[in-house]
Image: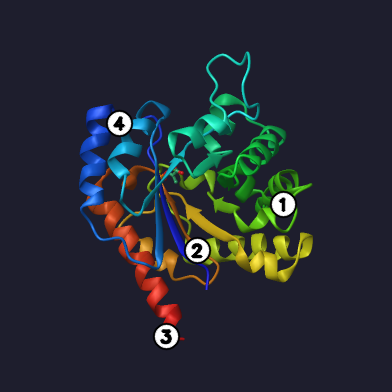
Amino acid sequence: MRRSIIAGNWKMNATLREAEALVTALVQRPIPETVEVVVCPPFTAISHVARLLAGSRIGLGAQDLFWESAGAFTGEISAPMLVDLGCRYVIIGHSERRTYFGETNEWVSRKLRAALAAGLAPIVCVGETLAQREANQTMEIIDQQLTSALTGLSAADLSRLIIAYEPVWAIGTGKNATPEQAQEVHLFIRNGLSQRFSQQAAESVRIQYGGSVNAANAASLLQLPDVDGALVGGASLKADAFQAIVQAAQRRGQGAALK
Ligand code: PEP
């Protein structure tokens, strides 16, 4: 049974004071054994959040990185720098980065390799736009994104890889994928991993769903057989809502254990 993973993507939100208030509220809440919980603050708050998380079971991640380790790359942050701050996870290829900052599949691939080389657990985002879904291109787009990201990776690399299926039309829109839509794409991703590597390797990869996950819809998405957690944007900025999603993931773990 894959361990559920709930990650909060704070995006460009939270001053130090706001970050402190949110993390202080989160660390007071119980984290179920069956759920891995991660927060991904903006770069500016990572070091402060790292101190606040000391001794807690909440893991720390970043929202992006650059593939070079150091050098003349003004404004960029490298994988070793994130490790230095205490990060264990990093989001790569979020659709907002692809859309607003021109990130390509090639860049995602380079960033993924840099993250793995530094020992980070990459959360690689894939997903189709509304136009692509309406043109029946969802699987083709996901396949292209996966092919580019995974080429050259070994089965051993997969043990740390997390994939987030985030339909672009569902991010920040309040319009989530239906459980049927989510399960269909998650299974497609898992089958793609199985074909490229092995069934055993594919079974070990956690695939998160992301796109308007909230306290009300989390349970219906997290109980799906190939949905192993959630990448949460807006709802991760509210301790109560985030905790409710974590609890929904715990119930998934309990349900599976009873089977
Ligand atoms: C995200 O930022 O990855 C995301 C899924 O955002 P939201 O939950 O707000 O749709």
Q: Earlier in the sequence, mark 3 or mark 1?
A: 1
Residue topped by disc 4: 14
Q: Earlier in the sequence, mark 3 or mark 4?
A: 4
Q: Earlier in the sequence, mark 2 or mark 3?
A: 2
Residue topped by disc 1: 143
Marks 3 and 1, Cα distance to the nearest angstrom? Answer: 34 Å
Ligand 1 appears in which quadrant?
top left
Towards the viewer: 34 or 138: 34
Q: Earlier in the sequence, mark 1 or mark 2?
A: 1
Residue topped by disc 3: 258
Q: Which residue is found at the position 73% from the left and 58% from the top?
A: 155
Marks 4 and 2, Cα distance to the nearest angstrom? Answer: 27 Å
Task: Name the secondary structure under disc 2.
Answer: loop
Tell me the kind of residue under disc 3.
Leu
Marks 2 and 3, Cα distance to the nearest angstrom? Answer: 17 Å
Residue density around tag 4, few if under 14, some if 14–19, many if 20 or more, within 10 Å: some
Marks 1 and 2, Cα distance to the nearest angstrom? Answer: 19 Å
Is label 2's Cβ within 8 Å of ligand 1? no
Residue topped by disc 2: 228
Q: Earlier in the sequence, mark 4 or mark 2?
A: 4
Q: Position of residue 136 (x, y in %)?
A: 67, 53
Eye-nearest disc, 4 or 1: 4
Towards the viewer: 49 or 164: 49
Marks 3 and 4, Cα distance to the nearest angstrom? Answer: 40 Å
Task: Name the secondary structure under disc 1.
Answer: helix
